[in-house]
Image (cartoon, helix red, strand yellow):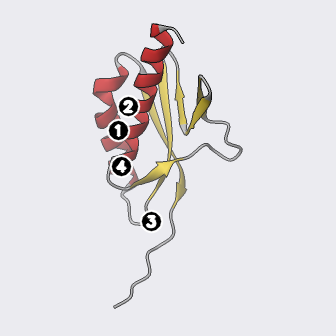
Amino acid sequence: MTAASGDFAATADAIAAAATAVPGVAGLHGGAFDEVATALPGRRIKGLRLDEGACAVHVAVDWDADMPRVADAIRAALAPLTGDRTVSVTVEDVGEPKEDRT
């Protein structure tokens, strides 16, 4: 692995971690056929497509999440990590409602 590929992998990992840390995000989502992914040496990060000019994040959100706010929060969380890349956020799935046990 070259230093450049290590830097790219570290950036991809940091972006994935920042996106999943946003409240309301249930996780990254690879799309209908797991076609949204970033290939790294020996592994893939599903739900993240990252290249030199763009960053696409595909997520599943919690049932009660305010989708526009979650998307805005993801973009804000990724801004320090993505540099000049265009960031797009796609909500691929919504989780099940939580049972009310009261």
Which of the marked residues, 3 or 2, is nearer the chain's N terminus?
A: 2
Q: Quadrant of residue 24?
A: bottom left
- Report whether residue 48 is seen: yes
Label 3 to label 1, Cα distance in Å? 20 Å
Q: Disc 1 marks which amino acid?
A: Ala
Q: Disc 3 marks which amino acid?
A: Trp
At mark 2, the secondary structure is helix
Left or right: where 77 falls relative to 15: left
Identity of the residue furthest to the bottom in this view: 102
Percent position (x, y) of residue 7?
A: 42, 16
Percent position (x, y) of residue 86?
A: 43, 23
Which numbered disc covers residue 18?
Answer: 1
Contact (Cβ within 8 Å) of mark 3 with mark 4 = no
Label 3 to label 2, Cα distance in Å? 25 Å
Which numbered disc covers residue 70?
Answer: 4
At mark 1, the secondary structure is helix
Q: Could you classify mark 4 by the number of other residues whose Cα lies within 10 Å: few (under 14), some (14-19), or many (20 or more)?
A: many
